Image (tube, helix red, strand yellow):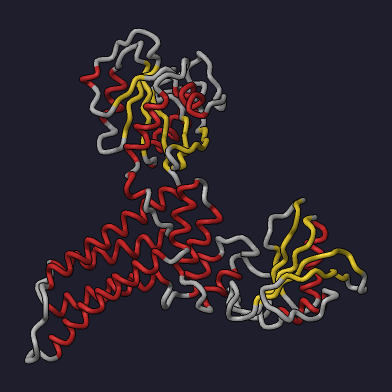
Amino acid sequence: MASSGTIAAISTALGHSGIAVVRISGPDAVFVAKRLLVRKEFPEAGRMYLTSLLDADGKMIDRVLAVRFAAPKSYTGEDVVEVHTHGGSLIARTCLELAVKNGARLAQPGEFTLRAFLNGRIDLAQAEGVLGVIQAKSSEALHAAARTLSGELSRKVQKIHDEILRLQGNLEIQLDFPEGEAFVGDLAEELQSVRHELTELESRCRAGMLLNEGVRAVIAGRPNAGKSSLMNALLGRNRAIVTEIPGTTRDIIEEGIIIGGVPVKLMDTAGLREADDVIEAEGVRLARQAVSEGDVCLYVIDASCGLSDEDEEYLAGLAGKKVIVVLNKSDLPCKVNNNNIPFPKIHVSAKNHTGLDDLRNMLYGICCDDSALSEGLNVSVSQLEEIHSAREAVSDALVSVSEDITAGLLGSARMCLLRVLGVDAGDELLDSMFSRFCVGK
């Protein structure tokens, strides 16, 4: 991703609105802005000025507000000018085109935030927080992203890094100068403390990822158990087609809800049975795949018909997964022997909408840790992997048989943590991360 020159982009969503913001950043930002506006000077940085936007012929086409942010105290760390036009799509595009004609170039996705990173305004963890704020689907996810954006993750990672560096340095000195003073303190005890901190940090980061990406809850079961009715009841509207004909649902139907601040993707699937119809058989295959890949399975049983041999067979195959057995049609006499079910179970009536709140609470409890969620931190998959690798390296150091191996493992752990912060991050990693941003951010 290019990171030189002066760039410009529309930083607000396209469409009709009160205002639109065109952002210009780079060494010639002020020069470019002067070519567009009646006002030729911005004597005070951070102050908005009322002025006029001029077209290529020097004619006024809009009354706008303009503000300059002087380097290095701007979002990107460069000179930045924002032009706030009225919110029509045409006027915003015209302002951007004029900026490009007068020396700027179109910004690439995420390039403003990339420049903020390259100029030391934020680190890579905080950049991930910016993306998290933009993409948050719930208030809890927003808070997790805000904690990361504020630098909480960075400070925690830096603190652990410095502790590891101290321990590694002491070991290196001991190896180089064995006749000197011995290591002060209990190394194993200090390594255990570091591992505990990394474990806690990894838990908070996994919680943040859960808040950001959500839980995949797959609704599965035999035909006519009431899977589609359950999905409609949880959604509070008719999304899936419900009929008395077995095999009505043949494809996977997905819809999102929020439970306890956590996004949950409900996935209604085809009824599990041996199917002769080619299309239904493909739906059954997709259903099995969804159950295998999902985070939790809501296995629906028609409690008025009892537990079939097929149900017992399917449930046996779910050993080791997170499963809630939903005994549907509780408005009718129950013929299920609960002792034959090895998973948490709950009675509901999708028809009468009873038991749904208890089901939501059970789904939240089986997937989420309240303490971790309330302190979640927004991270990317690669950052979470680095934190996990750092914890594994420290764990290996605890059982290492030699000091030089221990020192090497601590060095590996430190490098993992530095990559979380973006120290020595390669171009490929930066391109991959910042390309996920929208143009204008």
* Residue ID at (47%, 34%): 267
Q: Is residue 290 above or below residue 398?
A: above
The one nearer the camera, 283 or 391, is: 391
Q: Is residue 335 above or below residue 23?
A: above
The one nearer the camera, 9 or 370, is: 370
Q: Is residue 343 above or below residue 62?
A: above
Which corner quadrant holds the N terminus? Answer: bottom right
Q: Is any part of residue 380 visible from this angle?
A: no
Left or right for 127, reference 191:
right
Q: Position of residue 116 (x, y in %)?
A: 55, 73
Tell me where residue 184 sits by quadrant: bottom left
Left or right for 9, reference 162:
right
* Residue ID at (25%, 38%): 320
Tell me where residue 385 sits by quadrant: bottom left
Q: Position of residue 58 (x, y in %)?
A: 91, 74
* Residue ID at (85%, 75%): 38
